[in-house]
Image: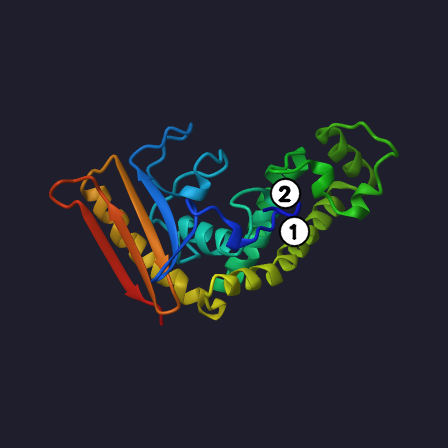
């Protein structure tokens, strides 16, 4: 499904991670009180992200500057846009979608990934030489057998750390721009109006707050759920395995 650039055909997703119901696009997800993934975090994961070690469960909590949660970002800006659910290239493209949806500036996140990962030779889902732009690769010795840390040390020595960071920031911005056409095509293939992406985000956040608060109050260990989206409404249905409240449905209109 991936063409080598972390771009996926959303119509080819397996049914167990994305399906089509009469009411719209169906996304299964799972809640656990504590995920056995090395983090022990409480929260939700799209079923598409289960098993990906880079994905930590998320709750209804939002950041200080963005009014939707990480789960909403994973759904709208990654998965429905046809990008990988993790990886630096996918995140660069998804952050550009987040910027379109919320008006946020992706630059601080790009800089964080550069400083914490790329400058240390770490790239998720691909090798460093696959990720770097051609002009930086051209600065490496011919037929190099350098490991990732050596590559970054060489580039810093050749052009300086400041210039290298600036070029990597440009590269992240270029990657973000490069995914915009694919994201628009992905939403169209799903029958979703991308012009409503901000409304979708707010609707999903509203329902997530209701569902997450309820399962937390009920002290559920595990919940299976599904989100169904169409251009007019969003539905969040969950199966609690609680005899008193075996299933709960939250719904809101898309305006």
Residue 80 in view of the camera: yes
- Circles 2 and 1 in contact, beta carbons < 8 Å: yes
Q: Residue at x 24, y 45 (%)?
A: 239
Q: How was this image coloured? A: rainbow
Q: Front-most of 253 and 98? A: 253
| Gap in angstroms between the C-alphas marked 2 and 1 | 9 Å
Measuring from the top left, give residue 109's x and y in whole percent.
Answer: 55, 49
Q: Front-most of 14 and 225? A: 14
Q: Secondary structure at mark 1?
A: helix
Measuring from the top left, give residue 2's x and y in whole percent.
Answer: 61, 46
Left or right: 160 in relation to 240: right
Q: Residue at x 74, y 27 (%)?
A: 147
Q: Which mark is residue 32?
A: none
Which residue position holds label 1?
172
Q: Residue at x 36, y 72 (%)?
A: 255
Label 2 neighbourhood size at 10 Å, few (<14), some (14-19), many (20+)? many
Q: Residue furthest left?
A: 244
Q: Secondary structure at mark 2?
A: helix
Which residue position holds label 2?
114
Label 1 neighbourhood size at 10 Å, few (<14), some (14-19), many (20+)? many
Image depth: mark 2 or mark 1 in front? 1
Q: Residue at x 75, y 47 (%)?
A: 133
Left or right: 77 in relation to 246: right
Residue 103 in view of the camera: no
Measuring from the top left, give residue 211's x and y in whole percent.
Answer: 26, 50
Left or right: 119 in relation to 202: right
Q: Is residue 126 above or below residue 150?
A: below
Q: Is residue 49 above or below residue 183?
A: above
The answer to which of marks 2 and 1 sits earlier in the sequence is: 2
């Amino acid at each position: 499904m991936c063409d080598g650039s972390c771009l996926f055909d959303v119509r080819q997703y397996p049914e167990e991670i994305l399906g089509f119901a009469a009411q719209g696009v169906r996304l299964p997800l799972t809640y656990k009180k504590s995920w056995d993934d090395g983090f022990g975090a409480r929260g939700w994961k799209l079923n598409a992200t289960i098993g990906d070690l880079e994905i930590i469960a998320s709750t209804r909590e939002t950041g200080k500057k963005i009014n939707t949660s990480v789960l909403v970002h994973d759904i709208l800006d990654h998965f429905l846009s046809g990008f990988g659910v993790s990886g630096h290239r996918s995140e660069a493209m998804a952050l550009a979608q987040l910027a379109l949806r919320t008006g946020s500036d992706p630059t601080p996140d790009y800089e964080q990934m550069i400083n914490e990962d790329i400058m240390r030779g770490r790239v998720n889902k691909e090798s460093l030489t696959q990720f770097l732009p051609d002009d930086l690769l051209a600065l490496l010795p011919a037929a190099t057998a350098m490991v990732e840390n050596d590559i970054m040390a060489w580039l810093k020595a050749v052009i300086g750390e400041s210039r290298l960071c600036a070029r990597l920031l440009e590269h992240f911005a270029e990657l973000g721009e490069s995914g915009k056409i694919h994201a628009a095509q992905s939403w169209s293939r799903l029958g979703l109006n991308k012009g409503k992406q901000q409304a979708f985000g707010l609707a999903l956040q509203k329902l997530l707050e209701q569902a997450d608060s309820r399962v937390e109050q009920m002290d559920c260990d595990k919940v299976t759920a599904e989100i169904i989206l169409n251009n007019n409404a969003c539905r969040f249905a969950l199966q609690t395995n609680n005899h008193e409240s075996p299933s709960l449905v939250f719904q809101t209109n898309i305006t």
